[in-house]
Amino acid sequence: MEVTDPQFWVAVFQIIAIDIALGADNAVVIALACRNLPENKRNQGIFWGMAGAIGIRVLLVFFALQLLTLPYLKIIGAFLLLWIGVKLLLPEPAINESGPVVKGGATTLSGVIKTIVVADAVMSLDNVMGIAGAAKDSLALVIFGLLFSVPIIVWGSKLVMKWIERFPVIIVAGAGLLGWIAGGLLTTDTVSQEWVDTQAAYLHWLAPVGSALLVISIGKWLAIRIHKKRGVSVDLLKKD
C-alpha cells in the first residue's frame, strides 16, 4: 500500500483504534510495576521497559500468525500473567541489616523492566495480531503501529501512577485485570477454544471472572501472611 492509497489511511485509523482500545491495560501494568521505584527512576523504568516491550512486539508481529497457532502458548502466557498479577499485590521488601526479609513486587530497575517486558509480551498478543492484520503486510504500517502505541502507553502509565498514590485500590484492580486477561487466554488457546465454544461457552466469561478473583484472593492472602511475619497487624493492613 502507498500513502496515496485510501486503504493505507483506513489501515492507519484501524491501527490507531487498536492501540487506544488495547493499550490501556499495558499502561496499568507499567504503572503498577514502576510504583515501588524511587521517583527519580520511574521514568527510566518506563523508558527501558517500553524499549524492551517494543522489541518483543516487533518479533511478535513477524511471527504472530505462526505463534498464535502453537498449542499451549496462550495457556503458558495465562499462567505467567496470573503469577505477575499476584506479585503486583505483594508489599515492598522489608529491609533489615541482613537484607530483604521477603521479596514482594519488584523494587529494582532491572526487576521492573523484566516484569514490564514479560507482561507486555503476553498481553500484546491480541494487539500485535490486530496491527499485523490491519497493516496487511505493510512493514511501514507495522512500524507506525508500534511507534504510535508508545506515547499512548507511556502517557497512560504516568497518569495511572498519579492515580495510584491517591487511590491504592487501583493496584488491586490492576492485578485483577491481569487475572481477567489470563482467563481469556485460557479459553482461546488452540487446544481449548473448540471445546469451550461447543461444550462450555459460559467459560468465556466465567474463566476471566474466576481468574481475576483468584489473583486478588491469593495476592491478598500472601500479603497478609507477609505483613504478619513482619509484625504488622491485620487491622493496620486493612486501612492501607
Image (spheres, rainbow, N blue to C red):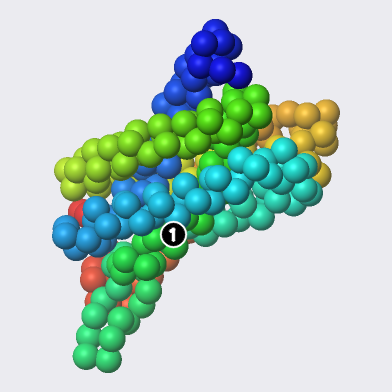
**Residue 237 position in % (x across, y down):** 25, 60
Q: Secondary structure at mark 1?
A: helix
Classify residue 136 by image quadrant. Answer: top right
Q: Is residue 220 visible?
A: no
Q: Residues within 10 Å of mark 1 (few under 14, many from 20)?
A: many
Q: Quadrant of the C terminus?
A: bottom left
Q: Nearer the viewer, residue 224 or 59?
A: 59
Q: Is residue 201 visible?
A: yes
Relative to residue 115, is residue 180 drawn left or right? right
**Residue 176 position in % (x across, y down):** 45, 44
Residue displayed at 82% across by 34% down: 194
Q: Is residue 8 above or below residue 221?
A: above
Residue that sits furthest to the top in the current view? 6
Check disc 1 and give the amino acid type. Thr
Relative to residue 201, is residue 86 drawn left or right? left
**Residue 148 position in % (x across, y down):** 40, 32
Q: Is residue 84 above or below residue 187?
A: below
Q: Is residue 150 above or below residue 50?
A: above
In the rendered image, which residue does mark 1 sit on? 115
Residue displayed at 72% across by 38% down: 65
Q: Quadrant of the N terminus?
A: top right
Classify residue 162 by image quadrant. Answer: top left
Residue displayed at 22% across by 61% down: 41
**Residue 49 position in % (x across, y down):** 39, 55
Q: How many numbered circles does the render carry?
A: 1
